[in-house]
Image: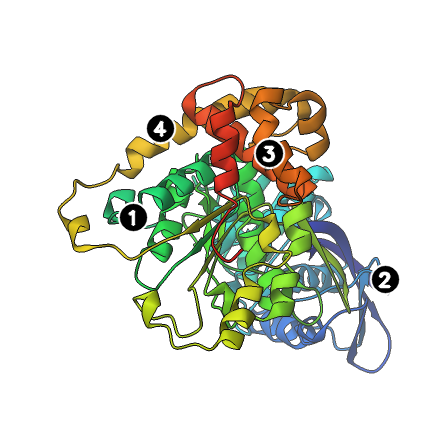
């Protein structure tokens, strides 16, 4: 009997667990038996591994071979275990265990000729190895820049199975750690490109300063999409910890570039209005994959024409908005993804959406159905609501609005003020503050709260709406450089919730 052992990582969501892979060669008819609760891609790995081993000039065992992946009860998916399976077989065939093999986590898919192909989820897998004390990780060379983002663990890049086998035996080298460059998006669009729309521009500034959700309604062509696209350019860069959170989600989704994987700017995700529930919140067979809400983590989720989105898909957004994370239960287990994002909604005023609302030909029932989407429980979680109007000819003669760089300075200064205020409570933005904390310790003065109290007493504003109004008032206060919201701040915040038809 000959036994070989190697190690890899099973990634569930953005969390990983070390998998021990054993290869046992015993007397008997030639055959491969794979055990350990794997999916179709893993079951097919025995054919890939056998072809890769023989095509690299190694000997495949001509007797009974059993491959076991432990823990047996842990669901295992994908081709990430190929290199570890091959290394375990070679160790068993040679009846020796290389010292490096006992201290290394192996990740990567094998081509039939022995080439090592890239895989998804390398960043969370390397983090798992680091957190569990493993000193070395071998990854496909195409994933090396991604793995190199993690300090404190030795990472190597492999191009072929033969190269890995030579390195394990101490007779060759792998590709060393590389200097990873931050992911750079294209040139950011500028706020000065938007013609007119002073109130909507200010709403975008307030949304950026306080991380508030925003809804814009109006006829087509007034700049709703343009303003939404310019919101990420106002947000501060991600901290290193936030960058790793976002990059890990994009790694699992398979969206990272090879040489510049680290995402340092707030992402902008804009799914189509025909997107399904699974496309928005995540899903798919086996282990659930991240959806649009998770890919927008620490950034902006823009839903254009949201009144045309399936009602079930819209309702599925309520829990992620409240909790900042989503848990998706599927056949192969529960995946947990973070999804703390800013929601930006945009919609026309009616289904026919003429450039001039006076030309609307929709019936009363159609308009009522359409408006019902704009006044549901989801919209009640939106802090800022703006109705935009068509620009007049005079808009082209006025001076350009402020540029993104000018507005960004005010936004960042307001964010710093909020961060300093909320630091003792473990939060960074006004939008994250709980209603209880606002009411107990950070309630504006009785004079400032007077108009809001009146609105609550009349039933015009709910308790949740009151909390959201106070959050916006604090953001307006931060933008103005004051230490406490004034009555004008509260009234302005209330005006952002009073949109025609709501």
SS class, disc 3: helix
Residue 392, numbered circle: none
Q: Pick whichever of labels 2 and 1 is earlier in the sequence.
A: 2
**Measured from the top left, where is residue 431 in percent x and y?**
58, 37
For the N terminus, which image quadrant? bottom right
Q: Which residue is mark 3?
A: 452
The answer for how far apart the CA atoms under marks 1 and 4 are is 16 Å
39 or 436: nearer the eye? 436
Within 10 angstroms of label 1, few (less than 14), some, or many (20 or more) residues?
Answer: some
Q: Which residue is mark 2?
A: 73
**Measured from the top left, where is residue 173 in percent x and y?**
51, 47
Nearer to us of marks 3 and 2 is 3
Q: Residue at x 36, y 50 (%)?
A: 227
Q: Pick whichever of labels 4 and 2 is earlier in the sequence.
A: 2
User: From what the image shows, is residue 442 above or below residue 199?
Assistant: above
Q: Which residue is mark 4?
A: 409
For the C terminus, which image quadrant? bottom right
Identity of the residue furthest to the top in this view:
483
Q: Residue at x 70, y 76 (%)?
A: 40
The answer for how far apart the CA atoms under marks 1 and 3 are is 37 Å
**Measured from the top left, where is residue 367 in percent x and y?**
49, 71
Residue 189, numbered circle: 1
Q: Pick whichever of labels 1 and 3 is earlier in the sequence.
A: 1
Within 10 angstroms of label 4, few (less than 14), some, or many (20 or more) residues?
Answer: some
Within 10 angstroms of label 3, few (less than 14), some, or many (20 or more) residues?
Answer: many
**Measured from the top left, where is residue 165 in percent x and y?**
60, 56
The answer for how far apart the CA atoms under marks 4 and 2 are is 53 Å
363 or 407: nearer the eye? 363
Q: Pick whichever of labels 4 and 3 is earlier in the sequence.
A: 4
**Res 45 → quadrant:** bottom right
């Amino acid at each position: 009997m000959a036994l070989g052992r190697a190690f890899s990582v099973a990634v569930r969501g953005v969390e990983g667990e070390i998998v021990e892979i054993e290869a046992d060669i015993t007397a008997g008819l030639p055959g491969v038996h794979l055990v350990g609760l794997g999916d179709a891609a893993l079951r097919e790995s025995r054919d890939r591994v056998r072809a890769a081993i023989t095509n690299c000039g190694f000997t495949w065992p001509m007797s009974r071979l059993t491959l076991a992946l432990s823990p047996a009860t842990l669901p295992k998916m994908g081709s990430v275990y190929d290199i570890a399976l091959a290394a375990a077989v070679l160790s068993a065939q040679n009846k020796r265990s290389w010292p490096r093999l006992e201290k290394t986590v192996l990740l990567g898919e094998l081509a039939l000729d022995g080439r090592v192909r890239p895989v998804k989820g390398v960043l969370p897998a390397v983090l798992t190895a680091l957190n569990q004390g493993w000193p070395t990780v071998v990854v496909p060379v195409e994933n090396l820049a991604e793995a190199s983002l993690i300090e404190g663990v030795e990472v190597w890049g492999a191009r072929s199975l033969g190269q890995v086998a030579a390195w394990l035996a101490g007779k060759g080298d792998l590709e060393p750690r590389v200097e990873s460059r931050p992911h750079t998006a294209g040139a950011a669009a500028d706020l000065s490109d938007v013609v007119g729309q002073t109130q909507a521009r200010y709403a975008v500034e307030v949304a950026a300063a306080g991380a508030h959700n925003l809804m814009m309604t109006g006829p087509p062509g007034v700049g709703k999409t343009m303003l939404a696209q310019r919101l990420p350019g106002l947000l501060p860069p991600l901290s290193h910890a936030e960058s790793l959170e976002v990059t890990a989600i994009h790694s699992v989704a398979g969206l990272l570039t090879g040489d510049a994987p680290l995402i340092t700017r707030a992402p902008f995700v804009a799914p189509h209005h025909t997107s399904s529930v699974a496309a928005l919140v995540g899903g798919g067979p086996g282990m659930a994959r991240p959806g649009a809400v998770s890919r927008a983590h620490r950034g902006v989720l823009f839903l254009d024409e949201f009144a045309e989105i399936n009602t079930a898909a819209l309702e599925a957004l309520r829990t992620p908005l409240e909790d900042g994370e989503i848990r998706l239960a599927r056949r192969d287990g529960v995946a947990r993804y973070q999804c703390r994002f800013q929601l930006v909604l945009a919609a026309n005023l009616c289904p026919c959406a003429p450039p001039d609302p006076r030309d609307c030909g929709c019936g009363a029932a159609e308009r009522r159905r359409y408006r019902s989407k704009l006044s549901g429980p989801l919209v009640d979680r939106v802090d800022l609501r703006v109705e935009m109007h068509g620009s007049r000819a005079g808009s082209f003669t006025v001076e350009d609005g402020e540029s993104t760089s000018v507005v960004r300075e005010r936004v960042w200064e307001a964010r710093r003020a909020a961060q300093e205020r909320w630091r003792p409570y473990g939060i960074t933005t006004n939008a994250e503050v709980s209603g209880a904390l606002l009411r107990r310790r950070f309630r504006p003065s009785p004079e400032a709260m007077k108009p809001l109290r009146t609105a609550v007493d009349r039933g015009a504003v709910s308790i949740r709406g009151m909390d959201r109004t106070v959050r916006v008032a604090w953001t307006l206060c931060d933008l103005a450089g004051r230490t406490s919201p004034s009555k004008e701040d509260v009234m302005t915040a209330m005006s952002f919730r009073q949109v025609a038809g709501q």
